[in-house]
Image: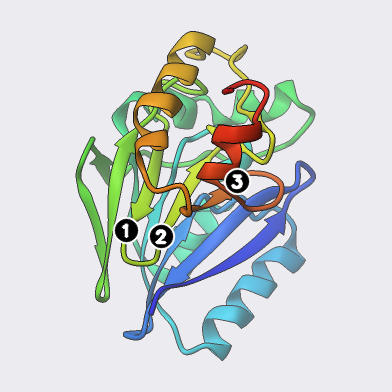
Amino acid sequence: MLKIEKFVVNPLGENSYVMYDETRECIFIDPGFYYEEEFQEIRDFIAENNLTPVKIVNTHCHFDHIMGVEFIRNEYGIPFEAHADDAFWVERVVDQGRMFGFEINPVNPFDSFLTENEKVKFGNTDLQVFHIPGHSLGHVCLYNSDAGVLVAGDVLFYGSIGRTDLPGGDYQTLISNIKNKLFALPDETVVYCGHGPETKLGFEKRTNPFLT
């Protein structure tokens, strides 16, 4: 059975996730851990639940979503995966942070790349990769049909959508991708967002002012 644990971290209130199943293998999604107490919280969670981390998977690589990548990669000796089109955000993470008033350590390049329709696998779980540019060029969403869950990063929020004013962003591209790819999934799909609370695709179809 798939389980998802959410950690609201760093000064921007980013949602970092640990996803695991009955095998106790787990992945980190968008580790934005920044403070020492956040590092310790995740260490404790992994140890207390007897989990075996196997990889880091990022929906995209804006600085608030990769602050904790090197800590996790070094702590557990696991690879870091994201879409190739977001590599430049990793290369510029120090400058990204400074633009917003944060001192961030460099993040090393991806160990491998995610591609459209690829399956991210851990334990007994498969996550389908959807490439959803518009918020960033390399943004992906991760979907598990058995559990009916979608990790949407900063593409779709409760009652809102991701910003499109950063380099590589495009409003029409984002709207088109949400409607044509994500809204093709079942209405009852639970959406785990990069910031804020969870939502459901059907609710967003009916009520989201950017998408109705």
At 75% from the left edge and 47% from the top edge, which residue is drawn?
13
Q: Residue furthest left?
A: 118
**Image coords of residue 167 (percent x, y):** 53, 12
Q: Secondary structure at mark 2?
A: loop
At 71% from the left edge and 55% from the top edge, which residue is drawn?
9
User: Looking at the picture, which amino acid does disc 3 mark?
Assistant: Met
Q: Quadrant of residue 82?
A: top left
Mark 2 touches mark 1? (CB < 8 Å): yes
User: Looking at the picture, which amino acid does disc 1 mark?
Assistant: Ser
**Closest to the observer, 1 or 96:** 1
Residue position marked by numbered label 3 in the rendering: 67
Which quadrant: the C terminus?
Answer: top right
Mark toward the start of the polypeptide (1 vs 3): 3
| Colour theme | rainbow
User: Looking at the picture, which amino acid does disc 2 mark?
Assistant: Gly
**Image coords of residue 84 (percent x, y):** 30, 30
- 2 vs 3, front mark: 2
Residue position marked by numbered label 2 in the rendering: 148
Q: CA distance from mark 2 to mark 3?
A: 28 Å
Q: How many neighbours does mark 3 have within 10 angstroms: few (below 14), some (14-19), or many (20 or more)?
A: many
Residue position marked by numbered label 1 in the rendering: 145
Mark toward the start of the polypeptide (2 vs 3): 3
Q: CA distance from mark 1 to mark 3?
A: 29 Å
**Closest to the observer, 10 or 108:** 10
Q: Secondary structure at mark 1?
A: loop
Which quadrant: the N terminus?
Answer: bottom left
